[in-house]
Amino acid sequence: MKRTVYTEEHEAFRTVVRDFVAKEVTPYFAEWEAARRTPRELLHKLGDLGVLGFGIPEEYGGPGVTSFKYEAILAEETAAADGVSFAHYTINTSISLPYLLGLATEEQKKRWLPGVAAGEICLCLAMTEPGTGSDVAGIRTRAELSPDGTHYVLNGAKTFITGALNSELCIVAARTSPATPEDRRAGLTLLVVPTDSAGFGYGKQLEKLGLHARDTSELHFTDVRVPVENVLGEVGKGFSYLGQNLPRERLSIAVNAVAAAAAAIQCALRYTGDRTVFGKPVADFQNTKFVLAECEAEVSAAQAMADRGMDLEDARELTPADAARIKLFCTEVAGRVIDKCLQLHGGYGYMTEYPIARHYADTRVSRIYGGTSEVMKTIIAKDMGL
């Protein structure tokens, strides 16, 4: 289906991104996957390209207010290039940076944003804990204010934290006061913690099913001193801040999932066109045509939904319920489509040398992180008055 979401300016940007991916990412991506980590230098190059600071005002070294659609183009172009990625990019720019843009004081913006725009400071977000995933109110990491009121002392542990090994700053959700019987969500605060702080420690780097070029680690904090100047927003309002940024995060996950599904169809078209069975290309069999037609129709519907979400995000009208609808539908479609496209590859689809295997492994988590599909259904049902 014809898309109307992009302008000529967006498409010119797409050409720049495509060239960058071909030169700086594709030739090295297999090495990054094997190392289970993307080199920090890539983030510097992305800073030079000007894509790390989307939304950062010009006075702080950024490009100013920008459309979310530029970030979507990055997702589409990396997916189309056999499922490579900028690894830490989404965590840094799509997920973590909006917290600084929306909550940082003027002094904090001057201190951090120029470095973020240049790629000298990279960000990660630490919410999930060993016993707390989608239930953010259950966070147990604690930050106690010092007697002289100059700093917080942070203690606790986080898990499934992506990009921490390449980050200079970590936005940590911690409990600065106990929850109350009336409100489990009370008492959470966001702290910006330099990763070179004394007591900031890395646990084991976790082995994942997919997304192998993205480091994912356990973190632990032992009496980490965090200056009160590093509190992000108001003390005790962390839960509401996390909720405000989740719609954009979920839209980003949906956009990436649709891009992967669209790329998977192209993988299947190439493979079934080249592969011969019983004397004719696999693409000539009616089953192949029907399966790919189903996939194309589903992805077109998901793409339309994601595109609508991008328009809403640019207009600052994306609601939590709509973001949940988009994430649920798009990620579930991606799971079905990529599975069918892998099946059309036969045994070769299970071999990691084929891009379809990367799409399959990398996309599975999209129905889990950023809120599981089950959580999305709960949000949608509540919005329906159920």
Image (tube, rainbow, N blue to C red):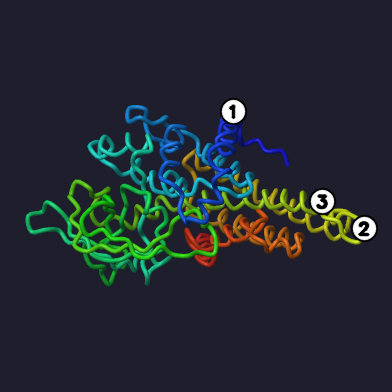
Q: CA distance from mark 3 to mark 1?
A: 32 Å
Name the element at disc 1.
helix
Residue at 39%, 48% (x, y): give it: 96
Mark linked to residue 274? 3
Q: Quadrant of residue 101?
A: top left
Q: Is residue 175 left or right of residue 261?
A: left
Residue at 67%, 49% (x, y): give it: 263
In depth, the one of 104 and 46 nearer the eye is 46
Q: Is residue 318 left or right of residue 100?
A: right
Residue behind mark 2: 279
Name the element at disc 3.
helix
Q: Is residue 61 left or right of residue 296?
A: left
- Identity of the amino acid at label 3? Asp
Does the image show residue 381?
Answer: no
Name the element at disc 2.
loop
Above or below residue 100? Residue 338 is below
Image coordinates for residue 323, horizontal then vertical, percent: 52, 52
**Nearest to N terminus: mark 3 or mark 1:** 1
The quadrant of the picture occupied by the N terminus is top right
Above or below residue 43? Residue 371 is below
Q: Say whether marks 1 and 2 touch (CB < 8 Å).
A: no
| Circle 3 Cα neighbour tier, 10 Å, few/some/many (<14 / 14–19 / ≥20) | few
- Identity of the amino acid at label 2? Gly
**Nearest to N terminus: mark 3 or mark 2:** 3
